[in-house]
Image: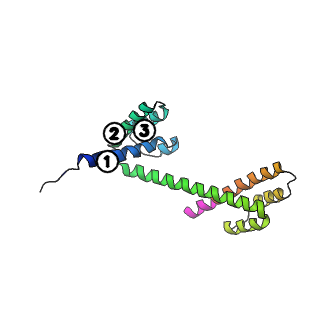
Amino acid sequence: MKISKPSKSARKREFQAVQVLGEQLIELTDEQLGGLDLDESLFDAVVAARAIKSHSALRRQKQLIGKLMRDTDPVPIQAKLDSLGRHGRVEKDIFRQAELWRDRIANEGTEALSGLFTALGRENKDLSEYTKAHLAAPNDNVRRQTLRKIFREIHKELSAKMQNTTH
């Protein structure tokens, strides 16, 4: 029985997929890139690609990254990129929820604040003070400042709640 090897087209598709995965490494921060277990030459190629401004030079560097990626197991890298993508979506959701709660508090006052405390499962003294300051604010500048404080505090609380539910 003869074992057939993949066709040239199949190998090219596989190499192209690995190169695209390697190109995604260029977009990572230093901290995220350091969290991956990359070969030193691949790591250096990714760091060098970040500094390249010329389009054609960057294209060649991406091809080099793709070539180096062929010798690397792509599964752990893909898993790490997937987890980073999920983390980004969670952050966006928290940000959006914080904006919605801030807007509700700005429009409805303490009624919305009570709803937020119910959703959080606890009260927050700073949020209560910021809301009172917002409702008693004498002008638009002070109201904007208090809304920023309210947003930051809500974002902090929602992030903490999300951390507690994931651990």
- Three-letter code for the amino acid on which mark 2 is drawn: Lys
Task: Provide residue 43's location: percent of width, then percent of height.
Answer: 42, 38
For the residues labelled 3 and 2, the Cα–Cα distance comes to 13 Å
Magenta range is: 160-167
Q: Which mark is residue 67?
A: 2
Examine the residues drawn in magenta and state their main secondary structure: helix
- CA distance separating discs 2 and 1: 13 Å
Q: Which one is earlier in the sequence, the residue at label 3 or at label 1?
A: 1
Q: Is residue 117 above or below residue 30?
A: below
Task: Decide: few, some or many residues near mark 2? Use Cα within 10 Å; few <14, some 14-19, many ≥20.
Answer: some
The amino acid at mark 3 is Phe
Residue 69's disc number: none
Q: Residue at x 79, y 59 (%)?
A: 131
Q: Quadrant of residue 153?
A: bottom right
The reply to whether the C-beta atoms of the residues labelled 3 and 1 are less than 8 Å apart is no
Q: Residues within 10 Å of mark 1 (few under 14, many from 20)?
A: few
Q: Which mark is residue 13?
A: 1
* Tag in front: 3 or 2: 2
Q: Give the residue at mark 3.
A: 43
Task: Specify few, some or many for label 3: CA neighbours under 10 Å numbering under 14, 14-19, or 20 or more.
Answer: some
Q: Is 16 above or below relative to 158?
A: above
Q: Does dot 1 land on a helix, a strand or a loop?
A: helix
Circle 3 — which element?
helix
